[in-house]
């Protein structure tokens, strides 16, 4: 699915807020296509593990906010788009919850 330029700009701005080395953001949309939530990835507080994925934050809000679609984005240090796909665990959770995960294409 094609992601609109204004959403890509919003995803990039959000990803720049991440304090992680690999900066990722996610936007959550309801059935009507309204943006209802956004998040970034974050390190675990105890410093162990790989941290909390941006889409995992939205999974915890999905039922309450009616999230049915998530778009994820990864950026480099200069704010340039980098390739991203959800990990197997997040893809499995999304599938079980009936949430579609889309990614931002490298060519915008």
Image: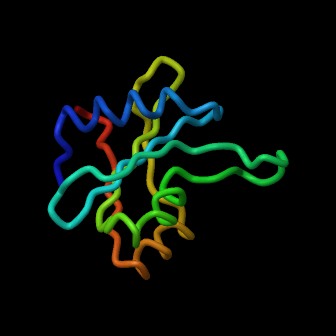
Q: How many marks?
A: 0
Residue appearing at x 17%, y 57% in the figure: 33
Depth check: give the residue in front, 91 or 63. Answer: 63
Residue appearing at x 52%, y 29% in the figure: 17
In the rendering, at what x and y percent does residue 74 appear? 46, 39
Question: Is 64 placed above or below 37 here?
Answer: below
Q: State the residue lying farthest toward the bottom.
A: 96
Depth check: give the residue in front, 79 or 30. Answer: 30
Colouring of the image: rainbow
In the rendering, at what x and y percent does residue 93 appear? 49, 74
Q: State the residue lying farthest toward the front.
A: 64
Q: Would you say 44 lies left or right of 47 here? A: left
In the rendering, at what x and y percent does residue 26 appear? 41, 47
Q: Would you say 80 lies left or right of 47 here? A: left
**Is the N terminus in the top left, top right, bottom left or bottom right quadrant?**
bottom left
Depth check: give the residue in front, 64 or 6. Answer: 64
Q: Would you say 35 lies left or right of 73 here? A: left
Question: Is 8 placed above or below 2 here?
Answer: above
In the rendering, at what x and y percent does residue 95 appear? 40, 77
Please identify the quarter of the rendering in which residue 8 is found: top left
Q: State the residue lying farthest toward the top.
A: 78
Please identify the quarter of the rendering in which residue 31 is found: bottom left
Question: Is 25 placed above or below 97 here?
Answer: above
**Is the C terminus in the top left, top right, bottom left or bottom right quadrant?**
top left
Please identify the quarter of the rendering in which residue 83 is found: top left
Residue appearing at x 20%, y 32% in the figure: 6
Residue appearing at x 40%, y 46% in the figure: 38
């Amino acid at each position: 699915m094609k992601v609109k330029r204004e959403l890509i700009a919003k995803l990039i701005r959000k990803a720049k807020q991440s304090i992680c080395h690999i900066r990722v953001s996610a936007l959550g949309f309801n059935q009507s296509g309204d943006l209802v939530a956004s998040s970034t990835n974050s390190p675990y507080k105890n410093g162990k593990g790989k941290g909390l994925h941006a889409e995992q934050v939205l999974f915890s809000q999905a039922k309450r906010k009616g999230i049915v679609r998530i778009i994820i984005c990864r950026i480099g240090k200069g704010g340039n788009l980098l390739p991203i796909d959800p990990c197997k665990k997040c893809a499995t959770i999304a599938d079980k919850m009936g949430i579609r995960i889309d990614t931002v294409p490298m060519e915008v």
